[in-house]
Amino acid sequence: MWFRGRRRRRPGRHFFFGNFYLNVGAQTATTIVAALALAVLAFTGLILFRNSDHDDLLQRGRRQMAEGKLAWATHTLQMLVNKYDDSYEGRVELGKAYLAMGDRVKAEKQFRLASSLKNRDLNDNAAEIAHSKLFIAQRRFEEGEKALLAAKKSAPKDRDLDVALYEFYESWGDDLISRDNDFARAIRQYRWALYYVKDYDAEDKLKTKLAAALGRHAQNLENQGRADLAVAYLERSLRYRYDSGTLIQVAELYERGEQLDPAIAWYRKAFDANPEIISIKLSNMLIKKGKALFDKGQQKEAEAYFTEADQIIKRTGVSPDTLYPVELSEMVITPKVDRAAGLLLPTLRLTFENRSQRQLNYLGTKVMFYSGEALISEIRETVASPDAPLAPLSDQTAKDARRTLTLRPRQWINLHALEGDALRVKVAIAYSQDEAAKWEIKGLQVIRIEGKRALSPEAEPASRD
């Protein structure tokens, strides 16, 4: 019987991971590969660390400059260039920080060092950009402009050059204003800076500067008697910053030129932008225009302007007395006394004058008698009505600009019931007769009493209480 037995395999020359280190050649090769990989990783880590550390310092310095922390920014950027002396951006930013602090000598040094880095793997325009900073520090703006524009012509798509041109023109405009108050030339430089700026925040900041320069230049033109040109510059400034203050400036220029229609139009724009500030000015202009139409016999057209002014008063809560000032030009009190009965009946003579530009179709007055804080008697009377309006005092031909009333309480006042030795008399006016009428105090006098007998009145300053 034939039996087939198992053959034992002869050990081959192949090896598994278990006896890996038994092969000297494999061990040597693997060690070399591992060493190379470790070296690459170490070098890559060093580069990443260097770059991250460099970028962190650079961004921190820029952020500190943006926040106005110039001393901190200088410290951070100096630390950056001390560690990485070949940092072009670090040198440029440090120079800008020194320049902002007014240290032009140190700024020039950093810009020169930045310029010298042209041959160290930087783009072809790095030196021109660094030189532009040097020109700013030395106030050689014409030369710097030529150099940057030449570089821009050769590399029109270079974004770094756009940034450099924006910063250059902005610095030029700042210098013209700070040194010479030359707003006209500064406006030109700011507009060029705006052409090259690409960052939103920088653009917004630049528009604010440009609008302010246009406003200052307009003011100078107005002082020179060139109001029309001043208006043109103010209107241009609104393209960059729509501000209610500028709208008011334009309106006031038209107003001073007696151009009522454009003045009203611009006051309306300012009112829409900021009703709380401009309501009184717009209302006064509307009243002035209404009066001009009224004087020409155009009563219907005039009333439209008066109505608009009234609506503004109601909308903004402005006191009517601010727009239609009425003066109590005379307040005379004659006390009539019944000594035996201890009674007092004061007679008041009041004269009102319309100091506004508008005819007042209604004006009411209220006289209040107080004993201490208690109201003991009150008189109400109509000063002006639609049938008998109160004309403006400015109208020299008006016979009805003043109105005098003689008033007295309906009943005698009991002296013995008074608190203390004084009777206070307040006079107020209102411009409407509805329940929402607001009373404005116009006069206050005190009747002094000795032994409960009325003597002559004493005037006291008008009060709002």
Image (spheres, helix red, strand yellow):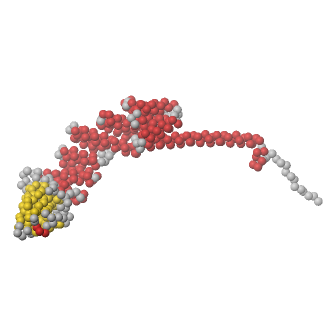
Can residue 446 be seen in the rendering of this structure?
yes
* Residue 29, above or below 393: above
Near-viewer residue (375 or 367): 375
Residue at the extreme right of the image, as rendered: 1
Q: Residue 41's x, y, as percent?
A: 62, 42
Near-viewer residue (6 or 80): 80
* Residue 423, above or below 47: below
Does residue 169 appear left or right of residue 280 in this picture?
right
Does residue 268 appear left or right of residue 394 in this picture?
right
Residue 341, quarter of the rendered image = bottom left
Q: Residue 130's x, y, as percent?
A: 45, 33
Residue pictured at 37% horizontal, 38% vertical: 170
Residue pictured at 25% horizontal, 40% vertical: 219
Image quadrant in which the C terminus is located: bottom left
Residue pictured at 75% horizontal, 42% vertical: 26
Can residue 151 be seen in the rendering of this structure?
no
Does residue 188 appear left or right of residue 396 in this picture?
right
* Residue 272, above or below 336: above
